[in-house]
Amino acid sequence: MSIMRMISSTTLLRLIIIISVIMGCDKPKTDDGDERDLLPNSFPADFTVPVDADSGNPLEGWGGGWGEVTHTPIVFVHGNGHSADNWITLASYFAEDGYSWNELWAIGYLGDVVTEDLFSTNEGNWAEIDDFVNEVLAYTQSEKVNIISHSLGVTVSRTWLKYSDDYDQIETFVGIAGANHGVAFCGPNQLSGLCGEVGHPGSDFLNWLNADDETPYDESLQWITIYNGAALDVFFPAQALMNDNTIHDLRNSPILEGANNIQFINLDHINLATAEAVYDTLSRYINTQ
């Protein structure tokens, strides 16, 4: 082999490496079947992460850092005792359908320390959702986001909107298995903290949250609920002993008057937030207005 051919081969190899780096170094892997490769596992360095109201530490979660914003960004809000990573399965379906990292964001709002009563409640966490959505809007330069929330995340997000009146920041609100009219996990006479808020349908908190209009601005904001409604969701049974010692049928608690309320009778509380059937349904509503 001549010296010139050796130089040409070496130069060509270097060019291939350079092109590969330029074209692929900042792009997530998508071909090895690992869900996490479809998604970021943290926030980008230039994203301003709000702090947790309880611990004072930066909020946990992931989102952003790669890709164009051609869809309305989605903010995922998890339920009680969960974290941002509970959304990996559902978010991966969106990623597989072409959503970039900059269009998928998940907040972990419970933080490292959960103080009894206040900071595991709706009242104790709604401001963190407010801060997070504002930062996502600023980072993505978007006018609106879509909210996909689950369980406690549903009422926390509704509390944020009720206090802030930031309904104009939302294109579609999805509430999955939310305790909109009470939840069955509080024992009799447990009236403090979260139990005081959602421990029975007639609580002061729920009366305030649901007053006037359960789905405000529905002429411009699309409201969707996802629920089981057949007692398969253990938090919403047909005969629930509430914390005020009354019995209530909670099967329709997640429903919001004025929303598109969609029932999945074969899915339990957790699977409602992970099932591909739920994604297939939501994908027909989100970004199709």
Image (cartoon, rainbow, N blue to C red):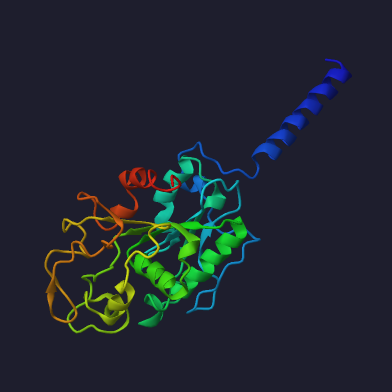
Horizontal placement of 242 versus 92: left or right? left
The quadrant in which residue 252 appears is bottom left
Percent x, y of residue 4: 88, 19
Residue 80 in view in this figure: no
Q: Is residue 134 left or right of residue 2?
A: left
Note whether 121 is above or below 32 in the view shown: below
**Which quarter shows the N terminus?**
top right
218 vs 195, left or right, is right
Seen in the picture, residue 183 relative to 124 is either above or below; the reply is above
Provide residue 84's location: percent of width, then percent of height. Answer: 44, 60
Residue 15 found in image quarter: top right
Percent across and percent down for residue 262 are 27, 52
- Which residue is painted at 60% across and 46% down in the image? 68
State how many labels appear. 0
Name the residue: 45% across, 65% down.
167
Q: Nearer the viewer, residue 164 or 8?
A: 164
Depth check: give the residue in front, 123 or 169.
Answer: 169
Reply above or below: 16 against 51.
above
Q: Nearer the viewer, residue 287 or 289?
A: 289
- Spot the residue most to the top: 1
Q: Residue furthest right?
A: 3
Residue 131, image x and y in percent? Answer: 53, 70
Where residue 276 sits, quadrant-wise, is top left
Residue 201 is at least partly visible in this image: yes
Q: Residue at x 38, y 76 (%)?
A: 120
